[in-house]
Image: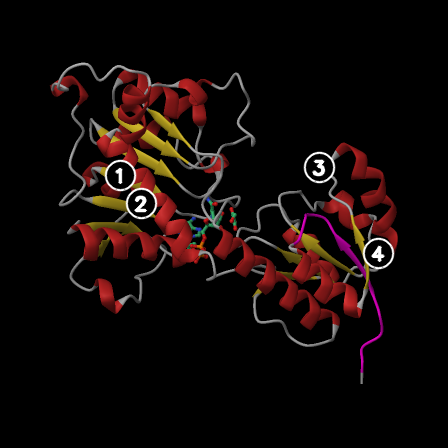
């Protein structure tokens, strides 16, 4: 029996094939509140919305309060820091997300940052582009090895372990990881060792953050933590900007504690034009492209759409986030 048509608010652009899947079964409003001309349509659709799908916009308590009919929100992201989790739990609103389909792509991006910072790839490619390659480069422009270096991974879930596989199995790097419990990752046996955060920071040549943003992780990397890192270490953030105190990161770079930082994410996105991180000579900054490949963004949109349709049909979606847990 076909399900009754419901009201769906799409708050971020969806590929046409996914939009069609939703529109065949339900009445759709497409309104991205980040676009100035669409905010009014978004606001107008909230009172009747029964399902929502989108990303990159905070669905906070104020938004939820204006959506009394809402039963499911499907996020086209694995991170759920944009959602008022406790309020969704209280109201029994399902939250779907996109674990797994972006793991390998995001790990590729993070490893690209490891390579780019260690070997100074962006800086030296720009030297060639700017006509500065007029003689053989000298020691002042040498990088540092990646293979064989110790990598410390803070947060050892899907993406953290995918980074560890690249590091350990591809580059012969010993892996330290900070996690709340020992990882079940047989392919990393003999390659990866659990450590306290302090031990990991003190012993790693390259520190990579792959934690979710939560009350427990907001601002986790501050002056104390950067101060514990090896002089000349490299710091990579592929998770969420707000996990890092950016002033402390800049200070550690300027004092020379850190050799370089590779950042895909920032406390404020897009990165403000006047942010010192944008132009710092030893920062490689990317515009939040962890999962941004054609293949992966299609897969994320398809999974989020499937979950939304399943939830609206009264079925249990495959990828539901447990809003009752404090964090992932
Ligand atoms: N740069 C980008 O474009 C992307 C960023 N992300 C970010 O990466 C995060 C991780 O994604 P997944 O690996 O799929 O999630 P996951 O849930 O598989 O892994 C997160 C791990 O961190 C652990 N953890 C949580 N709080 C902790 C704490 N306080 N101390 C120690 N460990 C803690 C969890 O137990 C879990 O093992 C997402 O939440 C998202 O914010 C994800 C995809 C793309
Ligand atoms: O999925 C996420 O959490 C992202 O940051 C973008 O893919």
Residue 153: percent from left, percent from top: 30, 47
Mark 1 near mark 2, Cβ–Cβ under 8 Å? Answer: yes
Q: Earlier in the sequence, mark 4 or mark 3?
A: 3
Mark 3 closeness class: few <14, some 14–19, many ≥20 residues within 10 Å: few
Mark 3, residue position: 34
Q: CA distance from mark 1 to mark 3?
A: 34 Å
Helix, strand or loop at disc 4? loop
Mark 2 closeness class: few <14, some 14–19, many ≥20 residues within 10 Å: many
Is residue 325 something that shows in the picture?
yes
Mark 2, residue position: 111
Q: CA distance from mark 3 to mark 2?
A: 31 Å
Mark 1, residue position: 115
Q: Is residue 232 magenta?
A: no
Helix, strand or loop at disc 3? loop
In percent of the image, x 25 and y 23: which residue is there? 257
Q: CA distance from mark 1 to mark 2?
A: 6 Å
Mark 4, residue position: 68
Magenta stretch: give its range.
Answer: 2-14
Ligand 1: does it lie within 8 Å of the C-beta at label 1?
A: no
């Amino acid at each position: 029996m076909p399900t009754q048509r419901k009201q769906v608010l799409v708050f971020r652009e969806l590929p046409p094939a996914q939009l069609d899947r939703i529109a065949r079964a339900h009445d759709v409003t497409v309104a991205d509140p980040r676009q100035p001309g669409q905010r009014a349509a978004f606001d107008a659709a909230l009172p009747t919305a029964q399902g929502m799908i989108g990303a990159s916009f905070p669905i906070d308590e104020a938004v939820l309060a204006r959506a009394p009919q809402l039963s499911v929100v499907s996020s086209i992201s694995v991170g759920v820091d944009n959602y008022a989790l406790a309020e969704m739990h209280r109201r029994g609103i399902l939250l779907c997300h996109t674990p797994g389909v972006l793991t390998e792509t995001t790990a590729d991006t993070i490893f690209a940052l490891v390579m780019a910072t260690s070997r100074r790839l962006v800086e030296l490619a720009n030297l060639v582009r700017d006509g500065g390659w007029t003689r053989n480069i000298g020691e002042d422009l040498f990088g540092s090895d990646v293979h064989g270096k110790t990598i410390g991974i803070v947060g050892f879930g899907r993406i953290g372990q995918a980074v560890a596989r690249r590091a350990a199995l591809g580059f012969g790097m010993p892996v330290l990881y900070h996690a709340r419990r020992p990882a079940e990752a047989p392919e990393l046996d003999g390659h990866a060792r659990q450590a306290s955060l302090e031990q990991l920071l003190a012993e790693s040549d390259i520190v990579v953050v792959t934690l979710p943003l939560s009350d427990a992780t907001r601002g986790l990397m501050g002056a104390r933590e950067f101060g514990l890192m090896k002089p000349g270490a490299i710091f990579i953030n592929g998770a969420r900007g707000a996990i890092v105190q950016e002033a402390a990161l800049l200070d550690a770079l300027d004092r020379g504690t850190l050799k370089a930082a590779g950042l895909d994410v920032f406390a404020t996105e897009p990165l403000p034009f006047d942010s010192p991180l944008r132009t710092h000579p030893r920062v490689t900054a990317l515009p939040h492209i962890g999962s941004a490949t054609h293949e992966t963004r299609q897969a994320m949109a398809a999974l989020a759409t499937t979950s939304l349709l399943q939830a609206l049909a009264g079925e249990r979606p495959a990828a539901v986030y447990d809003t009752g847990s404090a964090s992932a």
